[in-house]
């Protein structure tokens, strides 16, 4: 009876084991080379291409040529907010109300956008005279450099950069309050943010958010109406005055918050400031400044807005309120009337 031999492809054969070892060695080499290549990347670059002025210029020209749809959509949105076509603005107001009331309609928004783009391009490419035999034209190429469309895109980029810069400058006015440069103000903001967050978390389930978003969206549309803009311009002075008063009250609250407990419990008294001057070398020189109480040995008289130290000036004090002429005669050469 013939003895059976193991197949060369059997896992127990030496050839199969050698093949497995070779494959494992290849995998090890691949892993090691991947690790070495990843370690050679400069930290912080993220695998980005290096800075090149030529590449920057090329990418900027490409961006200008292909940024037209961005500004078309932006101009369309601004036209709706400015009520350039009242019917469109009312239509979008109704659509916004439906989206807020039925949030599931947001799932259909991408489909509506794609369908609108296709219908718009169909009307733009197919002549209205031959709807039964559409002959779409070629895909429009990006505008050439120096053309009207190219300059229009460049103008839109200029406006966008200015708006972003203005927004950044406006935001930088609040940065010092967030960087703990003013520790007291930053601490107050931290306290307010924590308290408002807890309050919002507790109250959020009871807020009708549908009505809130409907009101916010419709208010944004109504704010762009010409009548609303006129009313806002008329009410601007009153709003500015109210804002200033609110700012003063907020500043006082912050100042009171900075006071210590013993300072808050102390008694507030009203004091007056007096200044004694003498004539030296043809000029009046302040000698004594007193707050709250008069210097000892001085007697002050007041007639209208004028105040004179009679004892210092060498005059006499009579009963009753003297006249300005009496004080002038009693003041002598070294006395001075003060307002």
Image: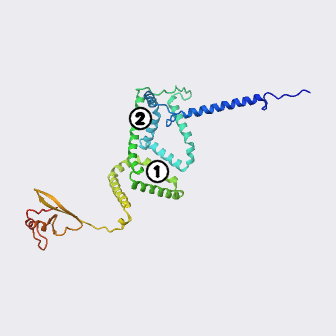
- Residue at the farthest bottom position: 319
- Horizontally, residue 328 falls left or right of residue 216, namely left
The residue under label 2 is: 157
SS at mark 1? helix
Q: How many marks?
A: 2
Which quarter of the picture shows residue 89?
top left
Residue drawn at the location 34% of the way across and 68% of the way down = 266
Residue drawn at the location 52% of the way across and 49% of the way down = 100
- How far separated are the C-alphas under marks 2 and 1? 29 Å
The residue under label 1 is: 216
Image coordinates of residue 248 in percent, x first then y, are 34, 57
Asked whether 147 or 57 is in front, the reply is 57
Q: Quadrant of the C terminus?
A: bottom left
Which quarter of the picture shows residue 183?
bottom left
Image coordinates of residue 175 in percent, x first then y, are 40, 48
- Horizontally, residue 254 falls left or right of residue 11, namely left
Ranked by sequence position, the earlier of labels 2 and 1 is 2
Asked whether 22 or 144 is in front, the reply is 22
Crowding around mark 1 (Cα neighbors within 10 Å: few <14, some 14 to 19, many 20+) is: few
- Horizontally, residue 127 falls left or right of residue 274, namely right
């Amino acid at each position: 009876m013939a003895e059976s031999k193991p197949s060369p492809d059997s896992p127990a054969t030496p050839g199969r084991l050698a093949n497995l070892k070779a494959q494992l060695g290849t995998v090890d080499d691949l892993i090691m080379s991947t690790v070495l290549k990843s370690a050679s990347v400069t930290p912080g670059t993220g695998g980005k291409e290096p800075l090149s002025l030529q590449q920057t210029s090329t990418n900027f020209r490409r961006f200008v040529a292909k940024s037209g749809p961005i500004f078309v959509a932006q101009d369309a949105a601004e036209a709706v907010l400015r009520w350039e076509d009242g019917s469109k603005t009312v239509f979008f107001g109704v659509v916004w109300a439906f989206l807020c009331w039925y949030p599931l309609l947001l799932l259909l928004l991408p489909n509506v956008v794609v369908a609108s783009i296709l219908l718009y391009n169909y009307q733009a490419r197919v002549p209205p005279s031959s709807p039964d035999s559409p002959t779409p034209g070629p895909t429009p190429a990006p505008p050439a450099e120096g053309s009207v469309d190219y300059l229009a895109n460049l103008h839109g980029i200029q406006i966008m950069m200015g708006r972003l810069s203005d927004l950044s400058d406006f935001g930088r006015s609040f940065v010092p309050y967030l960087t703990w440069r003013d520790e007291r103000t930053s601490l107050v903001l931290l306290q307010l943010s924590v308290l408002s967050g807890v309050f919002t978390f507790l109250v959020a389930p009871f807020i009708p958010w549908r009505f809130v978003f409907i009101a916010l969206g419709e208010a944004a549309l109504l704010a762009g109406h010409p009548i609303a803009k006129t009313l806002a311009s008329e009410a601007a002075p009153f709003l500015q005055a109210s804002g200033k008063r609110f700012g003063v009250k907020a500043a006082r609250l912050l100042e009171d918050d900075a006071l210590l407990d013993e300072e808050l419990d102390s008694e507030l008294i009203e004091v007056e400031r007096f200044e004694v001057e003498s004539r030296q070398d043809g000029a009046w020189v302040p000698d004594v400044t007193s707050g709250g109480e008069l210097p000892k040995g001085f007697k002050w008289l007041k007639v209208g807005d004028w105040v004179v130290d009679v004892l210092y000036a060498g005059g006499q004090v009579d009963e009753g309120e003297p006249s300005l002429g009496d004080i002038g005669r009693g003041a002598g050469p070294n006395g001075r009337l003060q307002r």
